[in-house]
Amino acid sequence: MRTYKNCQSCGMPLAKDELGGGTERDGTKSGMFCSHCYMNGEFTHPNITVDEMKALVKGKIVEFGAPTFIAGLFTRNIPKLERWKR
C-alpha cells in the first residue's frame, strides 16, 4: 500500500498527527489516514459527506487561529483525496 504525506480523508499532514496516524484492524499504522479519521480499520465518521468534512476541517483550522480565507484554501482540495474519489 502506498504511504501518503497527508490524510486521504481530511488532508491533515500525517507528520502532524499526535498519534502517528490511524490504525488498521491488526494495530498497524495506516499510511493513508490520520487518527482523527481512521482507527482500528474503520472511519471514525463513517457517514460524513465530503462537504461536512470540509466544514469540520475548516472549523478546526479557524479554531487554531487561522483566518477563514486561509482555512478555505487548506480545505479546497479535500474532494480530490482518495476517500472521496468514489
Image: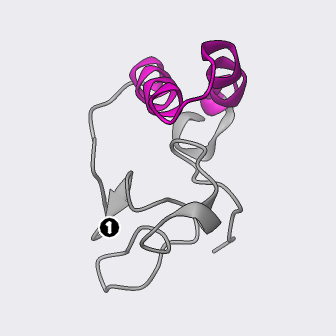
Q: Residues within 10 Å of mark 1 (few under 14, many from 20)?
A: some
Location of residue 30 with respect to 54 vertically, above or below: below
Quarter-of-image position of residue 82: top right
Q: Position of residue 24 (x, y in %)?
A: 37, 75
Quarter-of-image position of residue 19: bottom left
For the view shown, which residue lies furthest in the front direction?
65
Residue positioned 58% across, 62% down in the render: 16
- Look at the image and say whether residue 55 sits in the magenta stretch: yes
Start-end of magenta stretch: 50-79
In the displayed structure image, the side of residue 59 where residue 12 appears, left or right: right
Near-viewer residue (69 or 28): 69
Image quadrant where one finds the C terminus: top right
Q: Position of residue 45 (x, y in %)?
A: 28, 41
Quarter-of-image position of residue 73: top right
- Look at the image and say whether residue 21 sits in the magenta stretch: no
- Label 1 belongs to which residue? 41
Residue positioned 58% across, 71% down in the render: 31
For the view shown, which residue lies furthest in the top direction?
69
Near-viewer residue (12 or 60): 60
* Image label count: 1
Q: Position of residue 57 (x, y in %)?
A: 48, 32
Secondary structure category for the residue under label 1:
loop
Residue positioned 68% across, 13% down in the render: 69
Near-viewer residue (41 or 72): 72
Location of residue 14 with respect to 76 vertically, above or below: below
Image quadrant where one finds the N terminus: bottom right
